Image (spheres, rainbow, N blue to C red):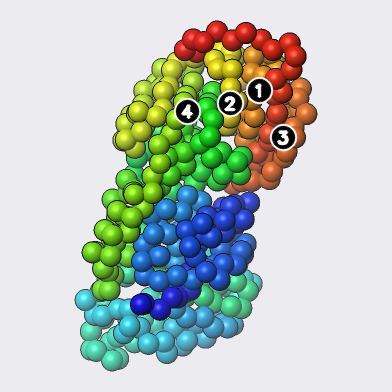
Amino acid sequence: MENNFKMVAKTMFGFEEVLAKELRKLGAINIEEGNRSVSFEGDKGFMYKANLCLRTAIKIVKPIHSFTVTSEEDLYKKIYAFDWSDYLTVDTTFAIDTTINSENFTHSLYVSQKVKDAIVDKFRATDGERPNVDIKFPDIRINIHIQNDHCNVALDTSGKSLHQRGYKTATNIAPINEVLAAGLLLLSGWDGQCDFLDPMCGSGTILVEAAMIACNIPVNINRKEFAFEKWEDYDEELFQKIVESCLNKTREFHFKIAGYDKAPSAIQKAQDNIENANLSDYIKVGQFNFFETEKTVDSHLHILFNPPYGERLDIEMEEFYKSIGDTLKQFYAGTDAWLITSNLEALKHVGLRPSRKIKVFNSHLESRLVKYVMYAGSKKAKYNNTEG
C-alpha cells in the first residue's frame, strides 16, 4: 500500500471547520485546521478523491520542501540546492505561483522569477539543458508560500481553482463563487432532508451546489482536468476507480429544490447551468418576484440566498431589505431562512431578530451569513399549493 503524505487544502475565511469536517468524512488522517487552510494526510488515491469531492477547497497542494528565508539571495540558494529531479526533467514545463506575507519579500512576481531562475540554473548545471516555463498549461505547477521568514514549497495538485467546477457557462451580475456557495450551504446545515428554495437565484450556483450536496454527487465530476493528471506518476486506472467509487455513493433526493428570479435572463442562465450539471431532474426555476410569493408546502423549508448588496444593483436598500423581512414573516412560516450580505446597515431593516450571524467573506467583502427562524405559529396560514 502506498505511503501517506501530507497535503494542504486551501479555503476561504470561515470555512476551515467545514472543510476539516469534509476531510474527516472522506477519510483523511492527521487533520489540522490553519488560517484559510486545513492540512491532512492521505495516499495518492485520496489526493484524487479530495480534488473530486471537497466542496469547500479552493486548491489542494502537496508540500515538498520548507526552509527559513531572509533575503532574495538566500531564497535563490535554497531553491537551487533542492533536488528537483524527483519532480522535473528538462522536458517538463512548469509554472510558479507565489503568495507572500513578509516584510523581507514584497513582490510576488519577483519571488516567482527568482525561484524560476534557481530551478533552470540548477538543471543547466546538472543536465546541460533547462526545462521551459509554460504559464497557461504547465506539466507541473509549483506553489511558493512565504509567511514572514518561512518558505513552503508545494506542488499544486488541482490546477485551476477548484471553484471552477465545469458546469457554469452562463453567469449573471456578480455571480457567487461556487466554493462560497457550497460553504454557506454546509454552514447553514443543509443536508438534503427537506425542500429547498433560493428566492433570488441569479445564474443558479446555490441551487446546483445544494442539489450536489443533497444527492452526494462529487462536486468536481464535471471538471475537465486536474493538475495531477499531467504528473509522471499519474495512475489513470486508479483515478477511474476513485471516480466510480464516488459515483456509487450518490443518493436519491426525495424533496424539491426551487429557484426564483425576477429577471428572465437570469432564469435562462440558471437553466443552462443546471442542465450542464445534469441536475434538471432535481431543480426547477421560475420567473417570480420573491416579494409576491408564498410558501407552497406545509412541510419544513430551507431557504438560502444572496440578495443584492447595493454594489451590484441600483435599488433602495432600506425598502428592499424590509420587504425581505415582511415576506418571510407573512408568507414563509415553518422556514429556516439564511442570507448572506456585506451590507450590514441594510440588515437592520429586515425587522427580524437573527438566531445566528456568521462572519464570512464574499470575495474581498466582509459579509455576514445570517439565519432567521420563521416558526409555524398557531395562526398557520393555508398555503396555495401552486408553482410560485
Q: Foreground residue, 9 or 78?
A: 9
CB under 8 Å between discs 3 and 1 = no
Q: Which quadrant holds residue 190?
A: top right
Chain-order first, disc 1 or disc 4: 4
SS at mark 3 in the image: helix
Residue closer to the observer: 223 or 27: 27
Label 3 neighbourhood size at 10 Å, few (<14), some (14-19), many (20+)?
A: few
- Numbered circle sitting on residue 255: 4
Numbered disc 1: secondary structure: loop
Q: Amino acid at mark 2?
A: Leu
Position of 110 relative to 184 (above/below): below
The answer to whether mark 1 and mark 2 are in CB contact below 8 A is: yes
Task: Say which element carries label 4.
Answer: loop
Quadrant, the N terminus: bottom left
Q: Nearer the viewer, mark 3 or mark 4?
A: 4
For label 3, the residue is 344
N-term mark: 4 or 2:
4
CB contact under 8 Å: marks 3 and 2: no
Residue 10: in sight, yes or no?
no
- Give the mark nearer the N terminus: 3 vs 2: 2
Name the residue beneath numbered marker 1: 334
Q: CA distance from mark 3 to mark 2?
A: 25 Å
Q: Nearer the viewer, mark 3 or mark 1?
A: 1
Q: Answer with left or right where residue 221 lies relative to residue 319.
A: left
